Amino acid sequence: MAEMKKSILQLDKICKGFFGVQVLYDISLELYEGEVLGLVGENGAGKSTMMNVIGGVLPFDSGSMKIEGKEYKPSNPQVATEAGIAFIHQELSLFTNMSVAENIYIDGYPKGAFGMVDKKTMYQEAGEYLEKYHVEVKNPGVIVGELPMGTRQMIEIIKALVKKSRILIFDEPTTSLSSREKNILFSTIKDLKRSGYSIIYISHILEDVLELSDRISVLRDGHVVSSGDTDKWTKEELIRNMVGRDMKQVYPVVEKQIGEKVLYSINHLSCAGFVRDVNIELHEGEIVGMFGLMGAGRSEVARAAFGVDPMENGSVTIEGTEFQNPTPSDSIQAGIAFITENRREEGLMMPKSVNDNTAMVMQRNLVGRLGVIDSKQEKALTAKSIAEMGVKTSNPQTQAVNSLSGGNQQKVVIGKWVVTNPRIFIVDEPTRGIDIGAKYEIYKLMNDLVEKEGKSILMISSEMEELMGMSDRIIVLAEGDMTGELSKEEFSQERIMAFASAANVEEV
């Protein structure tokens, strides 16, 4: 007789709505001891709402939840924490001005005599956790803001693990991780599973869900449309259940003519103390991809070229005009758009409305003779942008952008630039953390920009398949050096990875 699995978390017919709009419909799920349950669905499918219900952020309207057979109805997140539930969110919740150790123990510092914080114990234990999970931070007293995004993500994970939780919910945990850090995370999750932890793993990277999960549930439009053991799923079947149709073409196919005219060039760029002598040209109607492993210098090149960070040497040339150490204002006025990898901290004003965010960049062009913004024109242009980008919002004038799904947030980020009609786009991780349907829409927009409007795009991505599917050429960086350039007919994962690891490409 097969051994019965112990039920840890049970959701039975959970419903949730907002202002008369139903978001979750009779959600029923079960999580067992020592398993990984994969949860997939398009942005807006209801995953975040469901997690917020489990985490005590939102009350549910009807249905019931149980933890180990006992009724569970959290009134706030603290109740969820006390019940043994921990979240590792896609967007980090670390205090960048505090140390690693202080962040790890932010929810409960070790106490010593007279109730004072026992700093010695805190730093010692934090160091042990960092070593246990192979995080490359030698001193737990270092300030988090000085660390790269991948390391910060691992600290976020440790922060959840120290709470001794029984149920761990991972929401897009690999978005900022290098391949090595991702492998460490996966190894950690497998170890946790063997130790009896119960894990819900949410990701748009379907290959990861298939690798890690024991079972997978698919959400679509607020319903659980299908659940089953992982060995019964294929990537194609997951996509079909997520979007409700077959998607045979992940990357839109277009026939485009790349012009001879160079719209934009980065010339002998050195920056950030380790990026050296990078040279890139963008022709009219061309998408050039940039690949590199974590720490290769991709984002540093983009930020210095746009003017966010200073150049140490070099220049950029925009349609024949050279700029030494351009400022962001210089770049914007010259027709460049920069879509940052960190949409929450740098790309959006999260508490502001969809309309305010969409209008953010174009306002400088709407100032009338008396220095007053033409609000009528602004409203018309933002409405046009929101419609063309397909942003799903109940009311763009009042709805805060932080209440949108990740895919819709990214559409707002891109839309605020598109409405200014730039010639050149620098896009850093444009599809990070969004579902396959939203990705396709962004890919199609990018292709339309270069094919129909003759614009040029420098596209940075950690997803090699994405770059191969979208780019006309790929530039590869390794440890701050430009190690290779491949034309479309030369693309192969082996050659790209060889350049990225600074290996001998002639052998590949």
Image: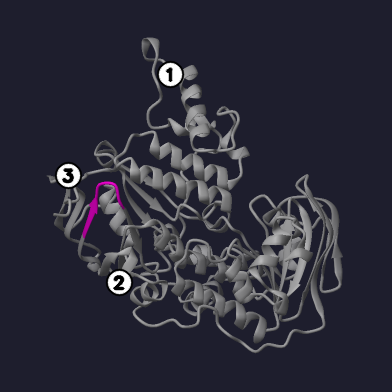
Pointer 2 residue: 221
Q: Amino acid at mark 3?
A: Glu
Q: Amino acid at mark 1?
A: Val
**Is residue 218 in view from this perspective?**
yes
Q: Which mark is residue 117?
A: 1
Is residue 31 located in the magenta-colored stretch of the structure? yes
**Quarter residue 465 falls in:** bottom right
- x, y (%) of residue 10? 19, 53
Pointer 3 or 1: first along the chain: 3
User: Is there a contact, CB below 8 Å, between mark 3 and mark 2?
Assistant: no
**Structural crowding at the residue carrying mark 3, measured as other residues with C-alpha within 10 Å and reported as few (<14), some (14–19) or many (≥20):** some
Q: Residue furthest top?
A: 113
Instruction: Name the front one of labels 3 and 1.
Output: 3
Question: What colouring style does the render use?
Answer: one colour
- x, y (%) of residue 122? 46, 23
Q: Amino acid at mark 2?
A: Asp
- x, y (%) of residue 70? 13, 44
Give the left or right position of residue 188, taking residue 47 as reference. Answer: right
Name the residue at 26% across, 36% down: 82
Relative height, residue 34 to residue 120 (above, below):
below
